[in-house]
Image: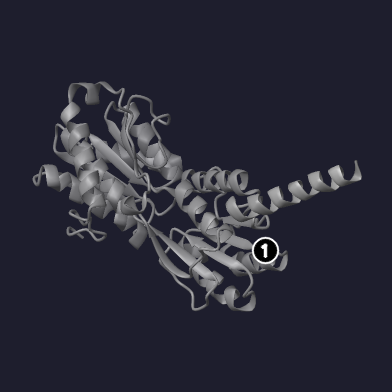
Amino acid sequence: MMNMKRHILGLLAVTVLVLSLTLPGLAQKAERVVMISPYGKGAPFDSLAYEGLEDAARDFGLEIKMIEARDKTEYESQIQAMAELGYDVVIALHDYFGEPMKMVTPYYPETKFVLIDSQITGDTDNMLSVAMEPQEGCYLAGIAAAHATKTKKIGFIGGLDHPIIIQFLAGFEAGLKSVDPDITIYTSFSGVFDDPVKGREMGLTMIDKDVDVLMHAADFTGVGVLKAAAERGIWGVGVDLDQSDVAPGHVLISALKDARGAVYETIRMVVEDEFRPGLMIYGIKEGARLIAIPEDLPFYKDNPAVLEQIEEARKRIEAEEIIVPKITKTR
């Protein structure tokens, strides 16, 4: 009987050893990962990023946390505090955290630092920046908008006149012009990302110029832009996540930045010992999902060729036959 028990225990030990060597994740210790956001889970992009964190927690057995850091003067101290608390991975969302993160990384060489949605890179081997490619999804959205407009007047409202926001505009404009070079695009910037009332007012002002498709890249402010589109019975174009529920029946397409996929991929790299410092591009070629189309809209049922044209353009972007500009030619 004793020999039988020893035999069974031996088999169990061998089984555990084999599993630990063959199943990804089991050979790794559970990571503690914290995400720092200036807006929290209420903001579209940040909410998607947190979903990616939750996905990774489920698949890799992580302990996770998200904190809000609204005061820019405290960004550096917040990043440092998370490293001091012993988190294995510190993820920060958006460009704002780039310089503060660079200041902290040299003092915590065992901690992995990830900056999502930025091209700001550090000088240490423990910081990775992930640059999204929003212009690619916006190009595809521009194709849809060009087919939907009847006035040939399109509006774009950005949160700030900032290089990342200009990427949205540049891609959208390129997509529009690929279908109809004669389309006019009106551009304005709200100066804020958290004022839907202002977004609505700006949207209505543009509609008064005979604009019949409105795109935003303005986070919460953009919710007001989409509400204005619905109020006046025109098309809106959402961003960051599928925003068709913001203005049902009036959101033609949403141009995404696949924050969920980007966060998951960076954590997978850490867990599976594939982390590499520097800059990582995350666009269509890398597998990012960059558009959401409500295909049940009557517009697409009446114009099935539009969906075919969008898919063909997506494939050409993936194959690098189309290189979508990041800077607009009209500004």
> At 57% from the left edge and 48% from the top edge, which residue is drawn?
56
Where is residue 210 drawn, in percent x and y?
19, 35
Answer with left or right where residue 178 lies relative to residue 16.
Answer: left
Where residue 322 appears, x then y in whole percent? 19, 53
Q: Picture coordinates of residue 266 (x, y %)?
A: 50, 57
Residue 314 is left or right of residue 132, and the answer is left
Q: Nearer the viewer, residue 88 or 121?
A: 88
Residue 197, compared with residue 247, is above or below; it is below
Whether residue 1 appears in this view of the structure is yes
State the SS at label 1: helix
Residue that label 1 marks: 82
Q: Position of residue 54 (x, y in %)?
A: 59, 44
**Three-letter code for the amino acid on which mark 1 is drawn:** Met
Of 185 and 66, nearer the camera is 66
Left or right: 169, with 97 as reference point: left
Q: Name the colouring of the figure.
A: one colour
Of 27 and 278, the residue lying toward us: 27
Q: Quadrant of residue 320?
A: bottom left
For the N terminus, the quadrant is top right
